[in-house]
Amino acid sequence: MNRWIRIAAAPALAVALASCGGGAGHESAAGANPATEPLAAPAAPKAAAAPAAPKGTALGDLVSIGSDELPQRGSIKIDTKVQENSLFTGFGCRAAASWEFDLNREYKKLTATAGVDDYSYADDEVNVKVLVDGRDVGQANVKLGAPQNIDVDVTNGLRLRIEATRNSGRCVAATGYSTTVALANANLAK
């Protein structure tokens, strides 16, 4: 306990000695007298590094142009998992849909998960085709509970087109219920 009293009283004692002209010459050859030095605050812990953001641009951040209809953006449930960053469209009573985007020759790769949402018709199968400047660069056949990953080269592409065609035209005309196709977590890497 005496040690703690000395440590706590040391700064006040150092000030008193300094104001009286004392204390000079009381340092040892090895350095400052620990009894007269104020206690240093412990070093603050280093902040954890933030996870690296994916490089590139979310496809949903690009403006959709020249499409049959604009894709919706937001959350959709594919194979029991809610996908927050998705582009999607319901077919309604149509058998096909397409979206187009201006790539501006800025990107090298498109990655995404193609699928149909969990509220779609169970027997509908959808072919999702990716075209860059009219050239087919990849396809995925998806159905309820069976999404597929897309990883395609879009290097030097000006226009990206996503075409989705389903094997049926089933729908409930009065409500618009049908199959919904989606690209989840679609990202364009530079």
Image (cartoon, rainbow, N blue to C red):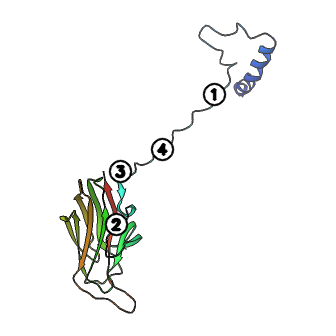
The residue positioned farthest toward the front in the image shown: 66
Among the two numbered marks 2 and 4 on one chain, the one whose residue lies closer to the N terminus: 4
**SS at mark 1 in the image:** loop
Q: Amino acid at mark 3?
A: Lys
Comparing 126 with 95, the one in front is 95
For label 1, the crowd category at 10 Å Cα-Cα, with few meaning under 14, some 14 to 19 and many 20 or more, is few
Give the image location of residue 20, x and y in percent: 82, 12
Q: Which residue is mark 4?
A: 48
Residue type at numbered disc 2: Ala
Measured in 3D between alpha carbons, the distance from the residue under mark 1 to the one under mark 3, in whole angstroms, is 42 Å
Q: Amino acid at mark 4?
A: Ala
Residue farthest to the bottom?
174
Query: What residue is drawn where x is 35% and y is 91%?
Result: 173
- What kind of element bears circle 4? loop
Mark 1 or 2: in front is 2
Q: Alpha-carbon neighbours of circle 3 within 10 Å: few (<14), some, or many (≥20)?
A: few
Q: Which residue is mark 1?
A: 40
| Above or below: residue 121 compared with residue 156 | below
**Residue at mark 1 to residue at mark 4: CA–CA distance:** 24 Å
Q: Nearer the viewer, mark 1 or mark 4?
A: 4
Tell me the distance, in whole angstroms, between the alpha carbons under discs 3 and 4.
20 Å
Q: Earlier in the sequence, mark 1 or mark 3?
A: 1
Residue at horizontal 22 percent and vertical 65 percent from the top: 131
Q: Residue sitting at 48 percent across and 44 percent down?
A: 48
Disc 2 or 3, which lies upstream in sequence?
A: 3
Question: Disc 1 to disc 2, how far (Cα)?
Answer: 52 Å
Label 3 element class: loop
Label 1 or label 2, whichever comes before in sequence order: 1
- Give me the C-alpha separation between circle 2 and circle 4: 29 Å
Q: Which residue is mark 3?
A: 55
x%, y% of residue 36?
A: 70, 18
Instruction: Tell me which corner region of the image, top left, top right, bottom left or bottom right, holds residue 78.
Output: bottom left
